[in-house]
Amino acid sequence: MRVPDLTLPPLFASVVSRLPATPPNLALVTLLNQLLKRGVLPADMSLLAGRHFAVDVLDAGLRLRFGADDNGFVLDDGHAEPDLRFAANAADLARMMLREEDPDTLFFNRKLTIEGDTELGLIVKNLLDSVDWSETPLARFMAA
Amino acid sequence: MSALNLKLTLGPSLFFWPRETVYAFYEEAATWPLDTIYLGEAVCSRRQQLRTSDWIDLAHKLADAGHDVVLSCQALTESESDLKRLRRVVGNGRVRVETNDLGAVHLASSAGVPFVAGCHSNIYNVDTLALMASMGAVGWVPPVEMDRDTLAAILAECRARALPLETELFAWGRLPLALSARCFTARHYNLKKDDCQFKCLEHADGARLSTREGKGFLTVNGIQTMSDGCHALLPHLTDIAAIGVSAVRVSPQATGTAEVVAAFRRAIAGSAVDMDSLPRPDGACLVDGYWRGEAGINPIGEHHHACA
Amino acid sequence: MKPLPELVCPAGSLPALKTAIDHGADAVYMGLKNETNARNFAGLNFDEKSAAAGIRYAHDKGRKVLMAINTFAQGVDISRWQRAVDQAADLGVDAVILADIGLMDYACRRHPRLRLHMSVQGSATNYEAVNLARERFGVVRAVLPRVLTVDQVRHVIEHTDVEIEVFGFGSLCVMVEGRCLLSSYATGESPNTHGVCSPAKFVRWEQEGAATASRLNGILIDRYGAGEAAGYPTLCKGRFDVEGDTYYALEEPTSLNVLEVLPSLLEIGVAAIKVEGRQRSPAYVAQVTQTLRAALDEAARNPQRFSVKPAWQAALAKLAEGQQQTLGAYSRPWK
């Protein structure tokens, strides 16, 4: 399965950006904590604790915010300046998550913006890379 | 301050100077208060103002005049002609050599020629040092990036193991940081390395590479990249002697090497030395970060003026 | 007909390892999560458990796993490096890749049956250096630094029994590996001492009006205009000023790609072709491995009429740093 190369229409973004952000943030944090609990996400929380993250899905007008403590991922009130921000269109983020494209390639091609603490960015990138999806039901979606 | 138990050596010139300049330099150096003189082409095979036989003749002449002399080997050895020159240096029949790669170690070791393992030998621990000694090393120059505490620990362990090796520290000059197959000086002039027109001759202390903010950072010296900062361990000589270093090395610069050598000699004799007045290569700032376990570029302590 | 070179691919994580195997790597190389390997980055590399799983996965499919212990053991207590060698032997890796000759000595005494490879960080650029490693420590393979032309590689091969491995694709070190201290000059940490180059914790991006500045420990490595692609501030790939010219004074951000000279490399008898990039993602590993596998197989089938397929070049070009590629030192004019 390849992610089609399309950009979401501007109308979509203008609608989404007006919706409250908490449900997607809550869904994301819950998912991350599930993955952490089952050992799928091999995160060393001591490297992430106290940090704030933002993921901007540019064409969807969606900004996901979350934080981390020693035990897992937490909702973020959104007031703190994120320590790390990823920004890309939905299709490119999906390609990155499904391992069709590597984040460095997207970065070299200027399709992915990474801002903030560079070392934290590497930690998160390496964390995503080290997830062994073959041990999960999601395996069939993965490109690599 | 009492006199320190340290020898003073002159490293091989890492720059490309005209033939007459080289001969004049060593004629003068022969009169300086040095314990050992290193010489030879250590950087680039295309630098042939002196041919290998000229270097060997010069070394033997200095040895005849009673000087302790070491022939330095080229650090990056790629082709058969590089190896051929290396074999001639190692087989010079009279003086010991400074090896700067494992190929040279192999040749010296097989021929039973005593050698000093140069700063490019990547000796970072006692086991590797002991192994070098077992292959015929009589001395070594620690990697220039090694900090004081690591070296002190290694030397303490050397004494415990009774390893009879002389330790010589790179103590003055632009630091040899990296080697490449590419010639950065030729690149600067948009020339191919094979047709470099010997542009290095125009840069007697190398060419300064600055950041886009105009801060001196590195030095382009043919295939070698050096620091812009002039590594200066002069303020640390008491400590250097105390941890068991046997000798300190001054790396030649285009002008003022005699003054630097004289200053080191005075410091070793126990006199105070005014660092600020010392001539530096191309007026570079003084750095000693490596020795203090920091970034090598960090300037020397506050009681001296790092930059002229 | 000489045997086809092994395709040796990078594994910074278990998924990358599996990906490399699944896409046609003959061998993968990995490192432990500490300063014993030259890609000592946070979140990367293997612990004992994932290493064992990776080795099992590779061996089940008849492929090899090499462990890189390729920094220089530091100081007096070098037990971490020795333990890494012991661990590798216990885990049953097919070879260890070492740079420090003291450690090679330890490995050949303690584990006489363990195959030793000389790392590219060992800076063996000529056959005398390679042969010393063979005579003293029984090294069976050497990875050559990226400084030799194809003819010079051939010359090394003709003068040694040691198998020769060369780089085929990936980010390019312009300096001789193992002989570059630029990173510690700027930051205090280098590949030789800490297994890192231009480490991320010293990197800062600063907005300066419309321009972006990239700094390493405060040193300006490059500055990018609004429309310019920004790169990671690897020291040697910045823009600097020499005598009034501002340019990539040492090296452009670029990747090595040997597809064009693949038939020559086969002809001179290199034993293995290595892909750089343990710090890259499984997606990168998949694409490079697949492409080089196809190219190697094609070159083996048809060495005389081998030509580089545009699709291969396109696949690799996309992955390249700065999207530029070079033959590097294999081609004399690069020098």
Image (tube, helix red, strand yellow):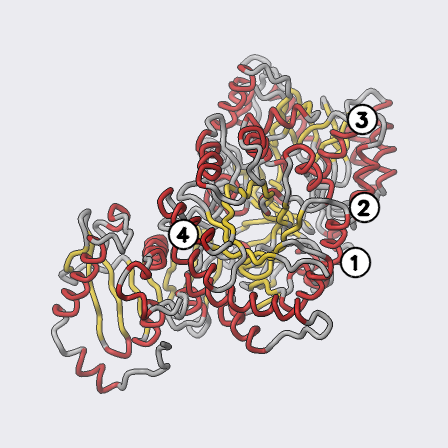
How many angstroms separate mark 4 from mark 3 (CA)?
Answer: 46 Å
Q: Nearer the viewer, residue C263 or B42?
A: C263
Describe residue B114's horizontal placement relative to residue C53 as left or right: right
Q: Are marks 2 and 4 in contact (CB under 8 Å)?
A: no
Say which amino acid is labelled 2: Pro
Q: Are marks 1 and 4 in contact (CB under 8 Å)?
A: no
Does label 1 lie on the same chain as label 2? yes
Distance in Å between CA atoms under marks 1 and 3: 33 Å
What label does residue C200 carry, if any? 4
Where disc 3 sits, the SS reads loop
Q: CA distance from mark 2 to mark 4?
A: 43 Å
**Nearer to the camera, B206 or B73:** B73
Residue C112 x/y as whole percent: 57, 32
Which residue matches tag 1? B197
Q: Give the distance between the C-alpha atoms of the residues marked 1 and 4, in whole angstroms.
A: 39 Å
Picture coordinates of residue B162, whole percent (x, y): 59, 14
